[in-house]
Amino acid sequence: MASPKTIRWGILATGAISVTFTKDLLVDPITRGVSNIKHTVVAAASSSSKIRAESFLRECDCDASAAAYGSYEELVRDPNIDIVYIATPHSHHYQNAMLALEAGKNILCEKAFTINAEQAKKLVAKAKEKNVLLMEAVWTRYFPLSVYVRETIQNGVIGPVSRVIADNSVPMDPTVNFADGKHRMVNPDLGGGALLDLGIYSLTWIFQTAYHTQEPGLRQPPEVLAAVKKYRGSAADETTTVLLNFPRPESAGGDIHAIATTSFSLAGPDSSIPPVRIQGTKGEIQVFGAAPRPSHTKLILADGTIEEKAWPQPGPGKGSNWFNGYLHWAHAEGEGQGMFWEADEAASAVLEGRKEGKYLGWEETITIMEVMDEIRRQGDLKYPDKIETTEYPTAL
Ligand SMILES: NC(=O)c1ccc[n+]([C@@H]2O[C@H](COP(=O)([O-])OP(=O)(O)OC[C@H]3O[C@@H](n4cnc5c(N)ncnc54)[C@H](OP(=O)(O)O)[C@@H]3O)[C@@H](O)[C@H]2O)c1
């Protein structure tokens, strides 16, 4: 057996999701049955200080030889990095991704990919010019659970998809947690609001089942009708509800309806209710657990068949004394967050010379950004010019 190829990562920003991602990244890929790739972190950068980058590297148990930088500019100049993972607030993705692309780096960039579709198009054009990987880090798409759901649809098991209902609402108690308005969830300067942060997952489920499963030549962008409720009269949305109609030829089953909902201000969801339902003429698939990190599926067919599946998270396992999670959500000992599958895909893409994510390419990322633009237009959700601009460089 050929020895695994090592991909060298540079981590741009040291916030909460960078910690979660980096810990997942360093889990031995064998624990999820991957034997051809290894990941290593060779550098991290903080915009605030080199000391912050050093403490991040220690916290994530990175190799002692990893470089710590006190600026993103230094990180993207590091010739030892194969892929830069960008995890700043969405307001900064465009500027940070452009910085890394100009330096000729491959990129895995957190969601929401950019603030608007124009920024996404400019990044794609730059990635083409530089001939590098540019991939949106929608980790859920790379879960084996998601692969199973898409394959079940494509195998015709539930008949043509007719309707998808997807919710990603997280109770965040905004009046307590975001009282000063500075948190990135509500701060317009940081692209705050439920839609870009949480609603992207509702749209992800709708797109990956109603759009991505169609033949590329048949896929058409949806019509969009949105209701947007602002957070305390601010520029950020707290609850957004969207009705989508995906045109599809009659011969393939006709139009597909979808409802995407998102909120950060509602009470906690009931775990017995699936946040995602994909309904066809012969049956439906229900997805349980949080929409971004689902854990169970239930296939219910019109003929009475019911097939339930659990999709446990791999990792070093019980007894490893290893813990991961996001912010205060710690998982059971040895259980990963699930971000390693997207990292494996980014690494495979680089090794195979591919420039786009396998399950979420440029065209689809841009189409989803266009849908979010339209939702924001209908809901009068505007961000400051400095984060909507495609001017590079712009100081933020
Ligand atoms: N895939 C997922 O599951 C997931 C989960 C959560 C968040 N996310 C995405 O990841 C991104 C970051 O989220 P997060 O929860 O990690 O946020 P966070 O904890 O606030 O961290 C963001 C980091 O960005 C850097 N940064 C640079 N300029 C900044 C500015 N003006 N204000 C604040 N931070 C700034 C800071 O790191 P330095 O000081 O080191 O530069 C900061 O620690 C967002 O786009 C979010 O949507 C993804």
Image (cartoon, rainbow, N blue to C red):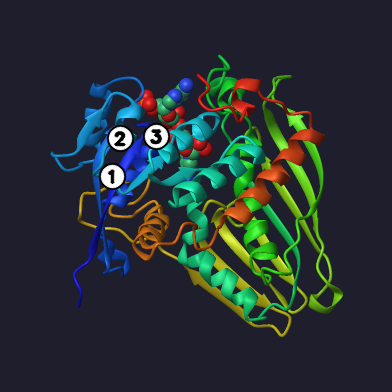
- Point out the frontmost of discs 3 and 1: 1
Q: Nearer the viewer, residue 364 or 207?
A: 364
- Point out the frontmost of discs 1 and 2: 2
Q: Amino acid at mark 1?
A: Ile
Q: Amino acid at mark 3?
A: Ala
Near mark 2 (Cα within 10 A), the count class, few <14, some 14-19 or many ≥20, is some
Mark-to-mark CA distance, 1 and 2: 9 Å
Which residue, given by chain and number where applicable, does mark 2 sit on? 77
**Local secondary structure at mark 1:** loop
Quadrant containing ligand 1 = top left
Mark-to-mark CA distance, 2 and 3: 24 Å
Q: In the displayed structure, does residue 261 sit left or right of residue 204?
A: right
Which residue, given by chain and number where applicable, does mark 1 sit on? 81
**Residue 319 coordinates in the image, percent (x, y):** 20, 56
Q: In the displayed structure, does residue 200 sit left or right of residue 303?
A: left
Which residue, given by chain and number where applicable, does mark 3 sit on? 16
Q: Quadrant of residue 33?
A: bottom left
Are discs 2 and 3 less than 8 Å apart at CB?
no
Q: Nearer the viewer, residue 71 or 311?
A: 71
x 42%, y 56%: residue? 342
Q: Quadrant of residue 173?
A: top right
Earlier-in-chain disc, 2 versus 3 = 3
Does the numbered disc 3 mark a residue whose Cβ is under 8 Å from ligand 1? yes
**Local secondary structure at mark 2:** helix
